[in-house]
Image (cartoon, grey):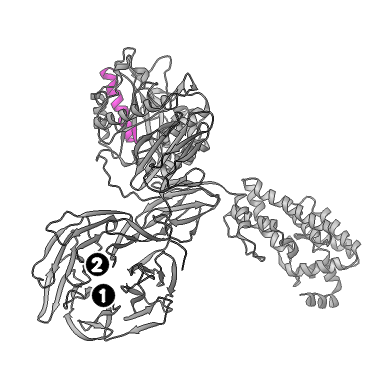
């Protein structure tokens, strides 16, 4: 470029000199161009301006402005600074004066251009200061002006000299501006460490609520959070970046996968899982990778004679076959076919060292251990429909080819022989039932092939077929779950093993030929004993959706499938564990699923209906961003019960508000759009004698009906003697006419004239309510758990509270199966720090905690709320109360399936330490702090000391210790 400019300067020196006078400007306006020509080339005419405007020195030109080509500008600046210093400084002064009213980013850009031309230390410092000011400006605010500034920065910064762009702050400005605008950053020409880009993104990131759903096929991530998803907080902007790993135990040695989730996007992240189980069902090792697999094959075992095994091969969706060693590490791969030919029937030799599959109508075989060898292709007449290794130790292949309706079994070292007239196609072949192979055709019929002709074993609905490795047994499963077995030599008689709870997707017989296992696409493995008559099956649970099973030579099982628990790590270090719920749903049919463990956000109706209330959509949007999924609006008092001195407990007109009118419909519609349930809080305290007349009851029933018709998800009834069992049963009968509606019973302690009237036993509770407030004395409710006396914290022991809470749980279960307590915040808590601690305790308990919306909006409480929603142990788990030696520390253990979380709450003003005994929990574990991500191991026999800050909580996930797999190699 220098030569081209020099050549042009020899022909048109005025043109190049005019361009030199413009090279310190971000952009050249028409007026700027005219003033520069008159100032520095006064003897030229306006024609020179037109010549420059259309010259090759210009990158682009519009009606009012032109931009010089960046490469040309670089040469022009060198020519300018190579001439007289006074002229260069005059051009700089002219440019700064002409653009003194230009936007700040333009002036910063021109300052950096000039500072970058100064070879002195002063120039270096001026560049650093200018870049620092620009970085502060593009990261300071979150409004549209800052977005515009970021767009200008992305436009101008790449045009700076290389010496300026070498500064890390120049790269930070580009990364931060791209992150703010949801754009991919430009390519870094200097290959800086990723930590610089990550740090720049943090400068403009904020808390973003995204949704995570654990499905049988993997994780569904959504932004904003989908209605049926668990809401979690992550740092981000237009894009949220997450590192995802499989979280099965024992854990695999695999690097996390980075997922970038953009705004208004949903992403399905497949999770392929392989887990090796002992005969008893205990996991030995696991492989979990966030990719979709078409097929999985397993073989081999780790032993002194065979140290290479076991191995797993995974056929990915793009046709690549990935080979994993016994530690789950990907050690080799067979690339996808260049022509895109599909692959199927992946199989692995008994030693776990050789792969085979079907591709392009032929068998392909490849030695993988000690390192991948060449692929051998074995062809025959017709297309290959299935291939398997013999189950003995010879690693010999047997495959079936189909030609002109005739199935032929072939082997690498054996003669081909027609075995079946397969007019109806072939789904699968099991060639090892003695010398007579079994065949499953396309019409779901099972045949036994023999020299005298084919013998039909099952006429229809066969889902899968397998057999024992020694050829003694053939097993098959039908679509209704029936599992049958045929012994060798007695193909005319079968044994009914039992019926699976689903249609089996795969079967396997163990190495000893004594047990049959089936999987069906959920978290269960069903095992039958072949040596007993009508044996009861053994059900083994796994933490993923299992759909393939293999018999290990060691006597155990290798199970493959998808889904399972996954670990998420945000860019700012927050960690989440998301697990699918494989536990059976034991709730009664009339208990809506959404109310289980739901947190209710109390909102005063003045916030919703008042004159200063925000638009309904804004109210519900703000509420959903706290993580709350149900709003409790009220209290509303029906007109027959309203106090004349307080005519409206929740609206401009008590009757209109109570009847579901007065602007409630837009609120309910807005709640639905933002995934928030809407429950109405009705105050039915009654008259001064606690009575409620027939007219009042009729008006209440009619008002509740109106609310339900407008989409309300349920009602909470507050009152004392006016609320009888018959009244609640009538309301429940009304709610049963609508889908998924709930009835909540709220009887505050103050409404009981005598402590003996409080329904602390099953006899005092209604059998109609889905949720009941805990109607116990303030001395035995949450107040005692926090040792609250007259608004202060004391040092009473929490055992009395534990016993009382256990009694209340038993009473509720006896009154109505599936009902929950609706714990509320103690009214005697006045200080914000005490309220925050009480909210944390409530969120650690089962049932439906009821908390004020303002408290749920506090960052600490909101974080706990999202953790509760993200972990099934906290929302659905069982409850155990423990005492670890500290009288001020309440210890709650929540368990659901394989997930266990220990919640510690310290009611003292100062930090307290509790000691976990060596026997708690059983076995060596690691404790992951869900709030700060710290991890500590507890493997005994020494007790573990844990500290909890004053008026603070810790939530610790209990997980097995990571397996010591030893050094690699």
Q: Is residue 959 left or right of residue 474?
A: right
Find the magenta span and give its range. 692-714
Residue 712 is a magenta residue: yes
Q: Quadrant of residue 95?
A: bottom right
What is the crowding at mark 2: few (fewer than 14 residues within 10 Å), some, or many (at least 20)? some
Q: Is residue 128 left or right of residue 468?
A: right
- x 39%, y 68%: residue: 317
- x 37%, y 57%: residue: 563
Furthest residue in direction top, as rendered: 689
Q: Position of residue 22 (x, y in %)?
A: 81, 63
**507 or 689: nearer the eye?**
507
Q: Is residue 574 left or right of residue 462?
A: right
Can residue 617 be seen? no
Position of residue 324 relative to residue 10, above or below, is above
Furthest residue in direction front, as rendered: 941
Q: Main secondary structure of the magenta part?
A: helix
Residue holding disc 1 = 392
Residue holding disc 2 = 511
Say which mark, if any, is on residue 811.
none
Q: Is residue 312 left or right of residue 127?
A: left
**49 or 434: nearer the eye?**
434
């Amino acid at each position: 470029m220098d030569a081209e400019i020099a050549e042009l300067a020899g022909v048109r020196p005025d043109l190049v000199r005019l361009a030199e006078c413009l090279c310190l400007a971000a952009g050249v306006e028409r007026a700027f161009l005219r003033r520069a020509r008159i100032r520095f080339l006064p003897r030229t005419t306006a024609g020179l301006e037109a010549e420059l405007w259309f010259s090759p020195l210009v990158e682009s030109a519009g009606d009012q402005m032109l931009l010089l080509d960046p490469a040309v500008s670089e040469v022009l600046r060198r020519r300018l600074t190579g001439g007289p210093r006074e002229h260069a400084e005059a051009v700089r002064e002219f440019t700064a004066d002409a653009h003194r009213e230009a936007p700040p980013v333009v002036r910063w850009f021109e300052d950096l251009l000039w500072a970058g031309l100064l070879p002195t230390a002063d120039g270096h410092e001026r560049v650093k200061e200018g870049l620092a000011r620009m970085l502060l400006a593009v990261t300071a605010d979150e409004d549209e002006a800052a977005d515009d500034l970021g767009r200008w920065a992305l436009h101008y910064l790449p045009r700076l000299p290389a010496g300026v762009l070498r500064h890390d702050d120049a790269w930070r400005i580009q990364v931060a501006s791209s992150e703010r605008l949801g754009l991919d950053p430009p390519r870094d020409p200097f290959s800086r460490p990723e930590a610089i880009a990550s740090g720049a993104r943090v400068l403009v990131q904020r808390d973003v609520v995204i949704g995570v759903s654990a499905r049988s096929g993997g994780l569904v991530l959504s932004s904003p959070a989908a209605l049926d998803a668990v809401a979690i907080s992550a740092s981000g902007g237009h894009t949220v970046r997450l590192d995802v790993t499989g979280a099965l135990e024992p854990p695999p040695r695999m690097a996390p996968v980075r997922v970038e989730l953009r705004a208004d996007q949903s992403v399905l992240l497949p999770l392929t899982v392989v887990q090796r189980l002992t005969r008893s069902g205990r996991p030995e090792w696991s492989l979990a990778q966030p990719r979709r697999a078409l097929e999985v094959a397993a073989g081999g075992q780790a032993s002194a004679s065979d140290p290479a095994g076991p191995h797993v091969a995974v056929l990915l969706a793009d046709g690549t076959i990935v080979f994993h060693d016994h530690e789950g590490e990907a050690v080799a791969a067979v690339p996808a076919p260049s022509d895109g030919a599909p692959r199927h029937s992946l199989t692995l030799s008994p030693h776990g060292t050789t792969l085979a599959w079907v591709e392009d109508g032929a068998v392909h075989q490849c030695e993988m251990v000690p390192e991948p060898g060449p692929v051998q292709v074995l062809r025959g007449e017709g297309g290959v429909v299935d291939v398997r290794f013999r189950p003995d130790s010879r690693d010999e292949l047997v495959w079936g080819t189909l030609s002109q309706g005739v199935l032929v079994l072939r082997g690498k070292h054996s003669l081909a022989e027609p075995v079946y007239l397969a007019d109806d196609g072939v789904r699968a072949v099991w060639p090892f039932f003695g010398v007579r192979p079994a065949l499953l055709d396309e019409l779901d019929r099972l045949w036994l092939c023999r020299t005298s002709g084919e013998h039909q074993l099952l006429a229809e609905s066969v889902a899968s077929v397998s057999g024992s490795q020694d050829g003694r047994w053939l097993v098959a499963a039908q679509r209704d779950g029936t599992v049958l077995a045929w012994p060798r030599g007695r193909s005319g008689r079968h044994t009914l093993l039992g019926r699976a709870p689903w249609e089996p997707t795969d079967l396997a017989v163990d190495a000893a030929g004594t047990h049959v296992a089936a999987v069906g696409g959920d978290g269960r493995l069903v095992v039958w004993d072949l040596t007993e008559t009508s044996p009861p099956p053994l059900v083994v649970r796994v933490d993923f959706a299992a759909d393939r099973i293999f018999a290990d030579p060691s006597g155990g099982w290798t199970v493959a499938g998808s889904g399972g628990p996954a670990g998420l790590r945000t860019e700012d270090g927050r960690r989440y564990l998301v697990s699918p719920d494989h536990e059976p749903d034991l709730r009664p049919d009339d208990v809506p699923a959404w109310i289980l463990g739901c947190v209710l956000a109390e909102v005063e109706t003045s916030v919703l209906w008042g004159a200063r209330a925000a638009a309904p959509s804004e109210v519900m949007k703000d509420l959903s961003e706290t993580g709350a999924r149900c709003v409790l609006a009220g209290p509303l008092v029906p007109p027959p019960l309203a106090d004349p001195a307080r005519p409206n407990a929740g609206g401009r007109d008590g009757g209109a508000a109570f009847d579901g009118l007065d602007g409630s419909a837009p609120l309910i519609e807005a709640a639905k759009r933002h995934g928030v349930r809407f429950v109405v809080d009705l105050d039915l305290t009654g008259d001064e004698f606690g009575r409620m007349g027939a007219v009042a009851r009729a008006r209440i029933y009619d008002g509740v009906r109106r609310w339900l018709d407008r989409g309300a998800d349920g009602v909470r009834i507050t009152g004392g003697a006016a609320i009888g069992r018959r009244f609640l049963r009538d309301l429940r009968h009304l709610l049963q006419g609508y889908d998924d509606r709930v009835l909540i019973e709220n009887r505050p302690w103050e409404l009981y004239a005598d402590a003996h009237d409080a329904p602390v036993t099953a006899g005092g509770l209604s059998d109609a309510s889905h949720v009941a407030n805990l109607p116990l004395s303030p001395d035995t409710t949450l107040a005692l758990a926090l040792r609250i006396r007259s608004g202060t914290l004391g040092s009473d022991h929490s055992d009395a509270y534990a016993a009382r809470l256990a009694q209340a749980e038993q009473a509720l279960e006896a009154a109505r199966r599936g009902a929950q307590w609706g714990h509320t915040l103690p009214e005697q808590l006045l200080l914000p720090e005490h309220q925050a601690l009480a909210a944390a305790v409530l969120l650690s308990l089962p049932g439906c905690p009821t908390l004020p919306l303002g408290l749920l909006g506090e960052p600490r409480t909101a974080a706990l709320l999202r953790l509760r929603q993200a972990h099934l142990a906290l929302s659905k788990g069982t409850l155990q109360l423990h005492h670890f030696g500290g009288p001020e520390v309440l210890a709650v253990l929540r368990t659901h399936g394989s997930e266990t979380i220990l919640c510690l709450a310290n009611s003292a003003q100062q930090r307290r330490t509790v000691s976990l005994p060596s026997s708690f929990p059983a076995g060596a574990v690691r404790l992951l702090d869900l709030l700060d991500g710290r991890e500590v191991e507890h493997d005994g026999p020494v007790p573990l000391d844990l500290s909890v800050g004053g008026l603070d909580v810790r939530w610790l996930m209990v997980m097995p210790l990571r397996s010591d797999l030893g050094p690699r190699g």
